[in-house]
Image (cartoon, helix red, strand yellow):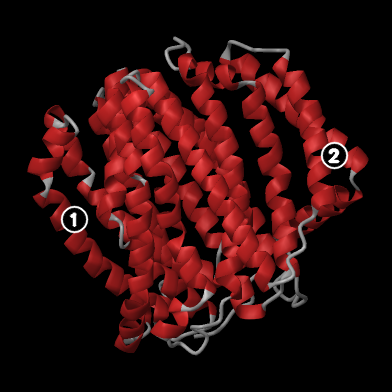
Amino acid sequence: MEKKEIRTHYSGVIIFAAKIATVATGIAFALIVANSLSQAEYGILGIFNIIIPYFTILAGAISFWTMRFVSRGAEGAAKTGVFTNFALAIIAVLAYLALLPIISPAFRLGSYLIVYLIMAAQVVEVYLISVLESSLQGNRPEYVGYGLLVGEILKVGLCYFLIVWRQMGIQGAALSIVIAFAVKAGFYFKTLFKELRQKLVFAYVKEWVKGSAFNIYNVIGDRIAAIMFLMITWYGTETANSYYYATSQIANIIVYSTLLAFALTPKLLSESKLGEATMSLKLVLLFAVPMTAGVLALPSSYLVFLKETGEYVVATPVLMILAIDALILTTSTIFGYVLMGIERVDEKAKIPFREVAKSRLFIAFSLPYAHAAITLPTAFYAMTFLAHNDPLLVTIYITGINTIGHTAMFLVQYFVVSRAVKFQIPWNTIGKYAIASAAMAAILYFTHPTRRLTTLIITAIGGVVYIGVLLAIDKGTRSLLRMSIGILKDRIRPKGRTDNSP
């Protein structure tokens, strides 16, 4: 397969721009759903976000190795990955359906069996989209951004049609998600049409299955750590789950910043340019830091924006905790990309089991277990002796403890990466981001808008203040802005040009 040069920042800007564009659609979807469903139904929808990952636990195992093989130009890797993940999807969805008699009473889903059946389709879609996006990430990452736009715009349109116009309630919300996922998968299939016509290489499957022992080990640890989120429902009922689901919809926007570094791992795998990692960190934090500051300054306003009746405003402390957690996760993700990109044990299309077990990859795969060891006993103690089944306290304790766990895991990643390579952290630039963000947050903090339009206007003014202060104090940001504009202009550059962009 032809090995294409990956333009890290071009791909990152395209994907991030697509995701920021879909912030509007995401807000629209959240507004329609939150204002059309009861608080109990909203919480039930959030429960599916907790249940489904336990059945998609293997989705990333094959996808992880598919991306690494595609990045290095392995013939037939994309087709083989899709074929293998689809087979796993069939097994997973059969298990999902078979466990209906157990899951339904455990999570009080008796009145929502049709929704449970609809979401079975999402299990299959997650497996397919995971491997399709990994294949694109290996040599054409920007198309993942286009797929995001296709799926998100369609999801909002379907949501309005099915919930508002057809009055289908939570069933309409589930159908809009499933149909949008299906169309996004179709777009990816069309984009990868040439690669999917190549031959299947079952020799890869043998290597991937061998290597997937580590991925499965990783995701099992991740699901063990995620048991604490099941505690939200067990101890706090659907009300606590609605608080968490509502606040996470806002805080997750901060995590979108990681998409600016989406192509970093395949870039490091193919070219080993550590300068790309420093630049990616700058670019990601350029957006993540002010987003976090904005949420911390106006948490209640954003919750009122979600639903003007104000029933989620009580979860303001939860949103503030999740905003800090999102910034930690965002920064940690960059170090995770670097850690995955500098490891070379599978460089020759072989996955030597013993070498992987001794490599830095295994440390990364083991982090969820360390996270669980910190958070689960602490969460159990908090639920038993401190939360008293109060929905708000349950959510505060769970999110706070989880943030502490993420902080510890970030410090481990930082230590491992700093010992392995000379990764320059731009402390001076980060400090300037913090100064500009503080100036913005000070203005936002004293406004406290209570209407949606006012909140949007104040947020926009805050963004202008941040950019203005940063451009005034940081020459590097001015250069970064010029580079980003150049990257976007490169999209319309005549095909005859062959010079390389960043």
Residue 420 shown left or right of residue 358 in the figure: right
Q: Residues within 10 Å of mark 1 (few under 14, many from 20)?
A: some
- How many angstroms separate mark 1 from mark 2 (CA)? 49 Å
**Percent of width and height locating residue 252:** 52, 39
Mark 1 highlights which residue? 93
Q: Say which residue appears at 77% left-offset and 19% top-offset.
A: 443
Front in this rendered view, residue 250 or 5: 250
Mark 2 highlights which residue? 470
Q: Amino acid at mark 1?
A: Val
Residue 262 appears in the picture as rendered: no
Q: Amino acid at mark 2?
A: Leu
Q: Considering the image in quadrants, where does the C terminus appear?
A: bottom right
Of helix, strand and loop, which one carries label 1?
Answer: helix
Q: Quadrant of residue 29?
A: top left
Q: Quadrant of residue 208?
A: bottom left
Residue 132 appears in the picture as rendered: yes
Earlier in the chain: of badge 1 and badge 2, it is: 1
**Percent of width and height locating residue 366:** 44, 63
**Percent of width and height locating residue 250:** 52, 31
Q: Residues within 10 Å of mark 2 (few under 14, many from 20)?
A: many
Q: Say which residue appears at 60% left-offset and 45% top-offset.
A: 328
